[in-house]
Structures are given as structure tokens and as C-alpha cells.
């Protein structure tokens, strides 16, 4: 439970920080062009909010009163309302005059919306002179200003990531194990062995690009490479990569290639099956269900094989049965244990090569170009992976908040926290730049269309596509959360 809370806290802090900075980018750009921002919210405030600078108790506490009272008795505010909502799925700034919703009244039902759809879709192109509004409204400003306002959050995300990467490199440097120092070599899947690799090989080149150290990003380089050069028994061997092999195939457990590690128990995670069975740091795991375990990779791959053996449409009972395993410890002790729903035992393995870690340090001014380069490489890698999202296997890999939370470490580690926060900032920036209505990229696309053609899209049309964009985003979110739930039950 403690581990879950630590992961959840890291996730909430990271997302809250990124949401504030992202929305702050829109807010700052709007203020520069004198566009009114009505609301600035962390999280969504449907029906009510946790905190609002326009709430009655806040006005009484600060002595601030509303700007003026309208005829219907409601207050009209001229400044920005700052607040915290109760739905932690994002945040927003409400900018005056972004879409004219007067043609679709708030009390209209969804049925009425569909009835009005043909009328709303008429006259998609309008003249700029036909656009009416106050000088402080978004709609009355030039297209180039509206484009900058909509890109403000995305730009802030990328700047945030670059600055974080720079400061991480400046503070901790860059630590890695050089390829030539990996005397245990690599562990390869059966598919990799069929392609010509052998356990113990050290990957030193993808095409003509040297591999300075091992990381999972090397798999991505291998998936795009024609040849991979390995060091085998002190000799260089060139392996031709099958061109039909995709990154999704390579990251499908067990990994196509991974760093080989001896099995050496470093610590037992509290509240796990490992603790319940009395596993100790000095124990040596010899086999799982009769299958010999030679190293930590074999141990992991055996658990992965149990999970993959579940039949299509397996239920919780099937998962529970598959997780009941027999371990042999220290050559003679037999233990019966039930794995977690994620098919884990619950111990941390000792990290190899602790005496061979190379640390590259950066001065303050050196760290900024290095941080930008690090961020651009991360962005390029993420963009390259997006091509798999629209495949059946790729859609199954889409994850929600549970998956995101799992990438954070079990114990609070500032270096890893900031690296993961920077990565999430890159992801948030890229996802928002996609030309999907309801995202920043959709609004930016319409503003770009106006800049290039000199023609403006009717606000009624924008309102319609906004609805469709929201439905699409909702469907993606449901898919992500469903995948997470299935993984929780080991399915």
C-alpha cells in the first residue's frame, strides 16, 4: 500500500505541475495580446470546485467583492477566476470568445443538438468582417495571435522538458555502463536467437551508429536498422536484421534484447508474496515450476511466460490458478506461492555493474544544449512509436493513469521523478499538438488554415467539430483505462 501511495503522489505532483505550466502558457500568451481569461483551473470543476477565488468564503476572507451585479441577480466578474477542481483529469483556461456558443443554448439536449446539426453546418466559411465581439475576445484578434495563444501551452511543455533535462544533467550528470564494460553481455529472446543473436553478445552498433551504452531506446534503433554489430567472444559479428520486425514485436515480453543480470536478491518489498513466503536476501532461486533459472532474466521470462499462457478471454479464476507456482530455493527447499495480479513475486534484484558506472558531468551552460538534445531525442523516439498506436497490438499497449503511475519508482527519487516529469511534459506537448478538435492542435489547425487561405471557419462549424473531438478523446480515454483495469487482473 505504501508503494502505491508513493507512486500515486509522484504522479499527482508531476501532472499538477505540468497542467499548471501548460495552461500557464495559454494564459501568458492571452495576456500578452490583451485577451481576457475568465478561468484558470487545475483539474476540472464540473458542478463544483474544491477552491475558487470567486467563492463566497474566499470573498469574505479576502474582502474582495464581485465587479458588478447583473439584473438577474448573478455576479459578473471582470478578472480571472483561479481554482482547483475535483476531477483530476487535466485542467483548463477559459478564454473569452473562443467559440460562439450562443447558437446552441446550454439547456438544449443532445437530441436537439443533432436536430440542429444541418443548420449549424451551413456557411462553413465566413468573412472576418462578419465576426462580431468585444476587443478583448479571442475571436476578434488576428489569426496569428490566436495561433500563438493556442500553441502557448505546447511551447511551454517543450520548454519545461528541455529545462528539466538540462537541470538534471547539471545536477546529477549522465550515468551509464559503457558497452565494452558489459562483461555479462545481453540476454536475447527466442526470436532474436533465430535472427542470429546469442546470449552474451554485446551490441556495439546499429547500422553505422555506435551504441555507447545500453537502454531500451536501442531496441528502437535496432527496429529501424538494417544491420546490428555485436561483440562475440572478442570478435565483431554483423547480423542482418529482418525488415518485417517492428518495435512492438521487440518490446513484446520477453524483450527481444535486454541487459543480462545475475539473480541476486537485493531487498524484499513489504506486503508482497516474497515477504509472505519468507524469502531472504541470501536465498537463491533455482527453478520455477521445474524450469531452471540461471539468471534474473530467466526468472522474469518465466513469469512472463505464465502470463502469456493465459487463454484468450481468461477470467480472474484462470489468472489466479496461473499465478500459483512452485519455487525451488537453494537447491533443496520447495515453496508454494501465489504471485501478485501483475505476475510479480515482490523483490528487487541487485543492479549489476555498480563498480563500472561511468558518469558524464555537465557545467551549467553546457547542460542547456545537452538538455535540448536529450529532449529532442526523446520526442523523436516517442513520435516514431506513435505509428504503432493504430495497430491492434499497439492499441492494447495504450495505458491510462495506472500505467503512467507504474513508471514512477517505488521510493521517492528526485532524479527519476524529474526525468519522468520531463518525459510526461514531452508526451503532453506532442499529444496536444495533434490536429484533433478539442485539443490545442485542432484550434491551431483552424488558425493556420485562416493564415494560409485568408478564409475563416464559422464558429458554428467549430462548435460541431469540437463535439466530435470530445467524443474521440473520451473513447481513447475509456480504452486506456479499460486496458489498465484488465492488466490489474492479470488479463
Image: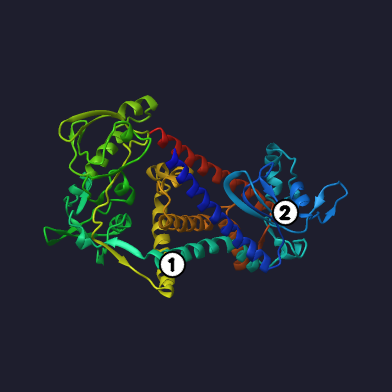
Question: Which x, y percent locates residue 250?
Answer: 29, 49
Question: Which x, y percent locates residue 449?
Answer: 60, 63
The quadrant where residue 140 appears:
bottom right
Relative to residue 450, is residue 485 drawn left or right?
left
Element type at mark 1 = helix
Residue underneath mark 1: 166
Given residues 426 and 291, the one toward you in this image is 291
For the residues marked 2 and 1, what is the alpha-carbon distance in whole angstroms? Answer: 42 Å
Q: Is residue 310 above or below residue 162?
A: above
Question: Which x, y percent locates residue 407?
Answer: 41, 48
Residue underneath mark 2: 100
Relative to residue 373, is residue 244 drawn left or right?
left
Residue with the most extreme bottom position: 365
Give the number of the mark in front: 2 or 1: 1
Given residues 22 and 175, the one toward you in this image is 175
Q: Residues within 10 Å of mark 1 (few under 14, many from 20)?
A: many
Amino acid at each position: 500500500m505504501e508503494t502505491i501511495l508513493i507512486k500515486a503522489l509522484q504522479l499527482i505532483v508531476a501532472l499538477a505541475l505540468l497542467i499548471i505550466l501548460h495552461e500557464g502558457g495559454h494564459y501568458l500568451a492571452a495576456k500578452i495580446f490583451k485577451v481576457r481569461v475568465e478561468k484558470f483551473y487545475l483539474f476540472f470543476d464540473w458542478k463544483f470546485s474544491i477552491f475558487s477565488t470567486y467563492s463566497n468564503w474566499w470573498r469574505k476572507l479576502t474582502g474582495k467583492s464581485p465587479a458588478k451585479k447583473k439584473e438577474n441577480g448573478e455576479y459578473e466578474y471582470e478578472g480571472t477566476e483561479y481554482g482547483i477542481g475535483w476531477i483530476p483529469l487535466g485542467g483548463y483556461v477559459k478564454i473569452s470568445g473562443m467559440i460562439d456558443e450562443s447558437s446552441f443554448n446550454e439547456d438544449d439536449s443532445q437530441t436537439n443538438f443533432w436536430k440542429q446539426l444541418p443548420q449549424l453546418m451551413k456557411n462553413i466559411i465566413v468573412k472576418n468582417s462578419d465576426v462580431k465581439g468585444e476587443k478583448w475576445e479571442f475571436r476578434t484578434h488576428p489569426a496569428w495571435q490566436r495561433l500563438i495563444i493556442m500553441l502557448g501551452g505546447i511551447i511551454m511543455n517543450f520548454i519545461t522538458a528541455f529545462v528539466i533535462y538540462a537541470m538534471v544533467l547539471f545536477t546529477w550528470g549522465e550515468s551509464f555502463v559503457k558497452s565494452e564494460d558489459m562483461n555479462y553481455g545481453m540476454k536475447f529472446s527466442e526470436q532474436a536467437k533465430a535472427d542470429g543473436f546469442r546470449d552474451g553478445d554485446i551490441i556495439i552498433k546499429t547500422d553505422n551508429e555506435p551504441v555507447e551504452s545500453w537502454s531500451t531506446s536501442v531496441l528502437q534503433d535496432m527496429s529501424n536498422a538494417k544491420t546490428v554489430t555485436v561483440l562475440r567472444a572478442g570478435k565483431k559479428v554483423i547480423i542482418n536484421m529482418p525488415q518485417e520486425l517492428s518495435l512492438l514485436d521487440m518490446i513484446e515480453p520477453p524483450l527481444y534484447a535486454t541487459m543480462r543480470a545475475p539473480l541476486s536478491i537485493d531487498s524484499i518489498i513489504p506486503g508482497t508474496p516474497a515477504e509472505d513466503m519468507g524469502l531472504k536476501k541470501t536465498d537463491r532461486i533455482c527453478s520455477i515450476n521445474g524450469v531452471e533459472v540461471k539468471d534474473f532474466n530467466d526468472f522474469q521470462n518465466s513469469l512472463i511466460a505464465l502470463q502469456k499462457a493465459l487463454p484468450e478471454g481468461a477470467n480472474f479464476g484462470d489468472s489466479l490458478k496461473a499465478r500459483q507456482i512452485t519455487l525451488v530455493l537453494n537447491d533443496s527447499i520447495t515453496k508454494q506461492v501465489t504471485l501478485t495480479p501483475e505476475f510479480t513475486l515482490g523483490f528487487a534484484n541487485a543492479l549489476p555493474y555498480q563498480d563500472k558506472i561511468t558518469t558524464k558531468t555537465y557545467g551549467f551552460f553546457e547542460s542547456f544544449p545537452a538538455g535540448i538534445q536529450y529532449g529532442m531525442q526523446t520526442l523523436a523516439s516517442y513520435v516514431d512509436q506513435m505509428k504503432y498506436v493504430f495497430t491492434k497490438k499497439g492499441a492494447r499497449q495504450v495505458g491510462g493513469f495506472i500505467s503512467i503511475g507504474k513508471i514512477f519508482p517505488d521510493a521517492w527519487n528526485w532524479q527519476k521523478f524529474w526525468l519522468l516529469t520531463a518525459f510526461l511534459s514531452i508526451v503532453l506537448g506532442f499529444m496536444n499538438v495533434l490536429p484533433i478538435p478539442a485539443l490545442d492542435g485542432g484550434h491551431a489547425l483552424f488558425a493556420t488554415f485562416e493564415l494560409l487561405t485568408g478564409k475563416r471557419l464559422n464558429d458554428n462549424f467549430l462548435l460541431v467539430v469540437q463535439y466530435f473531438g470530445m467524443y474521440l478523446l473520451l473513447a481513447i480515454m475509456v480504452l486506456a483505462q479499460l486496458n489498465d483495469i484488465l492488466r490489474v487482473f492479470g488479463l
